[in-house]
Amino acid sequence: MNGIDLGASTVTGNLNVTAGGDITESGNLVANGAGKTATFSAAGHNITLNTAPANDFATAGFTGANVAVSDVNGIDLGASTVSGNLAVTAGGAITENGGPW
């Protein structure tokens, strides 16, 4: 499997992405589902979701090596496994309801 570059997208429902390589974005991502939940899985690979101005997820979970994410509002970090660095930028509160980290 390969990595994936996600273009600007608004998803009605939850957003779930799995890749066998890096996950990146070339535009902002919005998840409009109940709770606006997004999950990204790229075990052993990087996840970079920090295109300006920012994404919009209420809750997001990650499985990857190094993870960088930005959210235009607050973000709640769900269950995640990050083996390297985690960088989170948000326009509101950064909270977490899951783990392990």
Image (cartoon, rainbow, N blue to C red):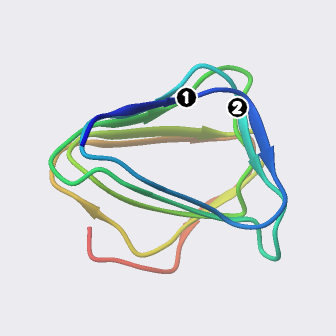
Q: Which mark is residue 54?
A: 2
Q: Where is residue 3 in the image (x, y as percent from the top left)?
A: 32, 34
Residue 59 position (above or below residue 18)? below
Q: How many numbered callouts?
A: 2
* Nearer the observer, 66 or 41: 41
Residue 32: image x %, image y %? 84, 59
Determine which quarter of the picture holds residue 76: bottom right
Q: What residue type is labelled 1?
A: Asn
Q: In this view, does 82 lie to the left or right of 90?
A: left
Quarter in which the C terminus is drawn = bottom left
- Quote the CA–CA distance across marks 1 and 2: 6 Å
Q: What residue type is labelled 2?
A: Ala
Using a 10 Å C-alpha cutoff, classify the residue at mark 1 as few (fewer than 14 neighbours), some (14 to 19) or many (20 or more): many
- For the N terminus, the quadrant is top left
Whether tag 1 and tag 2 are in contact, CB under 8 A, the answer is: yes
Q: Where is residue 59? Give x, y as percent.
A: 63, 66
Q: In this view, does 19 lie to the left or right of 36?
A: left
Q: Which residue is drawn at 75% across and 37% down?
A: 9
**77 sits left or right of 87 in the view:** right
Q: Which residue is drawn at 65% across and 26% down?
A: 7
Which residue sits furthest front? 1
Q: Indicate the position of residue 31 as horizontal and vertical percent values.
A: 76, 55
The label on residue 74 is none
Compared to residue 93, the image places residue 23 above or below, namely above
Badge 2 element? loop
Give the residue drawn at x 34%, y 77%: 99
Where residue 55 sits, quadrant-wise, is: top right
- Dot 1: what SS? loop
**Location of mark 1 (residue):** 50
- Residue 11, compared with residue 72, is above or below; it is below
Binning the other alpha carbons within 10 Å of mark 2 as few (below 14), some (14 to 19) or many (20 upward) gives many
